[in-house]
Image: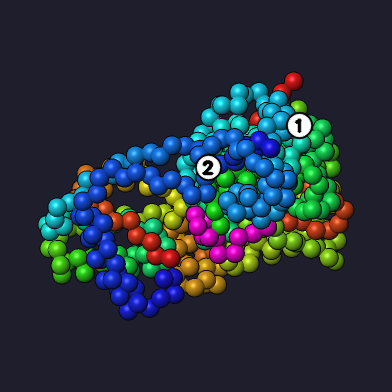
Amino acid sequence: MKIYSPTCTNPKQLLSIAPRRESLAQQVWGFVDTSKVNADLFIEEMKLAIQERYQPRGFVAIRKEAPGLPLTPGQTEQLAAECGVVVFCFGD
Amino acid sequence: MATASRETVSDQAKGALASVARALTVGAKAEEKRSDQSGSEEELLDLKGDCEEVNELFHEKGWTDGLPIIPPKEESVRAMLTHSLYGREKKLGLLPPAMNPVTVEKVAVNAVMAGCAPEFFPVVLAGVEALLDEELALYSMQTATNATAPLLIVNGPVTSSLCLNASGSLFGPAGRANATIGRAIRLVLLNVGKEIPGVTDPSTHGQPGKYTFCIAEAETESPWDPLHVELGYAREESTVTMIGTGGPQNIFTYGCECAEEILETFVGALCGLGHNNILFPTGPLLVLSPEHAGTLARGGFSKQEVKRYLFENARIPLSRFARGTKRAILERRARWFEAVDDAEHIGVADHPEDILIVVAGGAGIHSQFLPTSFSKRAVTKVIEMSG
């Protein structure tokens, strides 16, 4: 019998991602705190580890109002404008 | 991580740094999207075998919810599509979490699988349109450990013309229309959106609404305007309203003799700890039995007055919460504290009108409390009937 597939039959797509950094030294690191429990603590501990290893120029941390909410356009723009690298953190 | 010690969190962070550094620096170019192993390359599969064998194949492919399906044969899908005003190729949008394009045809295929009669299809389509509305926040509810699923509430003349159940056994087993329309929505989410339990759906326990979750309002049994009229639609329009909710919690008002006693019992049910309307600002959904609604109306309460009563009285002392929970409440429910002059309690909604009330169910002194979550608000779409 001829049966329709219930799924998507898209061809493979190429995804472009942000270019990688050659070095993490002297970067401004951005963090997105998902506001899950201990996400902020995780970020604080990671900052300490980064300071020991990479001599960062600074940190920018943005805490979401709720884990399920996306970043606002303003928050995304701030991260893009101020940071050399951005890390999205989960605390679950 | 939620209950981990500081030392454990510190170890996790230090341990993660190497992978983070690698991900930020190791050369990566445009990445080819991996083919979906549960997908198929062909739209139309030429299968040998009977219905049981087709079911086994669909189970192996992960294309079912674990229950038997109706094989989506060409003629069945064609029959389903005759009840759509749209062409089969029409793209309705990109369905989370995979953000795959969902077409009218794919919805029809999954509606056949679910066991829908063709005349149910316009309701299913309206439901998929509601899924795609950003206000529903579908991606957030799909990818959370919470037990939230989108509930479909049907209003208008279509509830009687399609024999949707607004009466006894409302949440199940509710009859063919409710069961299959709700199931069609879930199969679309599984097969097109790729909301796969344990893979992209990390829900700790799931809930029965992730099999099917569709009710109708008992508009002729209600002393008040139905939901869709309250939301600004004409009574003679047929609509679906969708919002993310947990499973229904029964509220049994045994011994209550008047409206006020019933309302106080509702307040008590809403003031339990741990439900989603403490942290999420959406506002709870109450499905009132016709008997409860009638008693409240005879006691002088309009629907708005019931909402106002619950808003004013269903408040939980902040002292009852763990320190971390209180911190999260102060952060995530900041609008409540701005709007209400009550710094010692948290209410279950930011505004009285955020509380949703629907009248449905059979005989009995039971109503249902469904905590809502993730959705910014309930989303309503008009059902476009063909012919």
Residue B295 horizontal/vertical position (percent)? 84, 52
The region drawn magenta spans B198-215
The amino acid at mark 1 is Glu
**Mark linked to residue B40:** 2
Amino acid carrying label 2: it is Ser
Seen in the image, is B33 located left or right of residue B147?
left
The rendered magenta stretch, by its main secondary structure, is classed as loop
Question: Do marks 1 and 2 share a chain?
Answer: yes
Q: Chain of mark 1?
A: B
Judge whether residue A4 is colored magenta.
Answer: no
Q: Position of residue B122 (x, y in %)?
A: 69, 31
* Front-most of residues B110 and B57: B57
**Residue at 62% in and 24% down:** B86
- Tell me the residue that label 1 is attached to: B119
Is the residue B42 above or below the residue B260 in the image? above
Task: Specify the quadrant of the image occupied by residue B114.
Answer: top right
- Nearer the observer, B240 or B297: B240
